[in-house]
Image: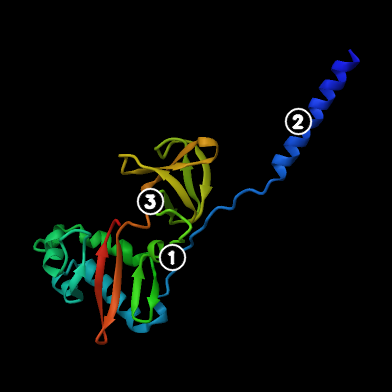
Amino acid sequence: MHFFKSTQLAWLQSSLLLLVLVLSLPTQAATVLKPVDNASNDPSFLAFRSQLLKTIERKDAKALLAVVNKNIHASFGMENGIEDFKKMWGLNKPATSQLWGELSKVLKMGGSFSNKTTFVAPYVFSEWPESQDAFENWAVIAKDVNIRAKPSTSAAVLKKVSYEILPIEFSENEQWVTVKLAQGKKGYIASQYIRSSVDYRAFFEKINGLWQMTVFIAGD
């Protein structure tokens, strides 16, 4: 009997020691990507962007195309240049073009200068950390965003996150993005609060003293 008590005590002591070691291990800090907007570093670009946002609000195709570079990089295929850009985005019927919504989101999400004459937007692309796989991780783009147990606004909230980069799983649900949590669990974030770094982004370059959009593209 004494032998069994000693064995149980030793097992309990080793279990407690293991628990203390596990609890004392440092937890991996979340990777955070906070919003960045350096547009004000160049007043000429800041004024250009402000005017471009007004052009977008009016859905003014003529004014937009006046600042689109003739050799704009618009896809990873053969469709490049201003004529292909117009066809891709249906700018012959500007009122129904999807371009305005996509470009507006990109511009309103800030960005940063890659050099003195090139501004890249949004910050989710321009500031994306090289340590994070851009296809396996997406960035939460707001503060105190709910991660829910199911893809529904009525589902239980598992936790709240702010500007974190999270591993994701792909699904066909356009309203919700599936994120991977600890211990193999899954959660769901409403798609408007999380974004892929390889979603649409724009490059603006100052050429001969004038700002032009030289890239508007998604993917890789």
Label 3 – label 2 distance at C-alpha: 40 Å
> Hey, which residue is sitting farthest left in the picture?
92
Q: Please state which amino acid type lies under the numbered disc 2.
A: Ser
Dot 2 corresponds to which residue?
Answer: 15
Q: In the image, 128: left or right of 9?
A: left
Residue 113 versus residue 16 in the image, above or below: below
Q: Mark 2 and 1 residues: CB-CB less than 8 Å, in contact?
A: no
Mark 3 or mark 2, which has the lower sequence index? 2
Q: Please state which amino acid type lies under the numbered disc 3.
A: Phe
Dot 1 corresponds to which residue?
Answer: 127
> Hey, which residue is sitting farthest right in the picture?
2
Mark 3 or mark 1, which has the lower sequence index? 1
| 103 and 154: which is toward the camera | 103
Dot 3 corresponds to which residue?
Answer: 135
Residue 36 versus residue 67 in the image, above or below: above
Label 3 – label 1 distance at C-alpha: 15 Å
Image spot of residue 144 (x, y percent): 50, 52
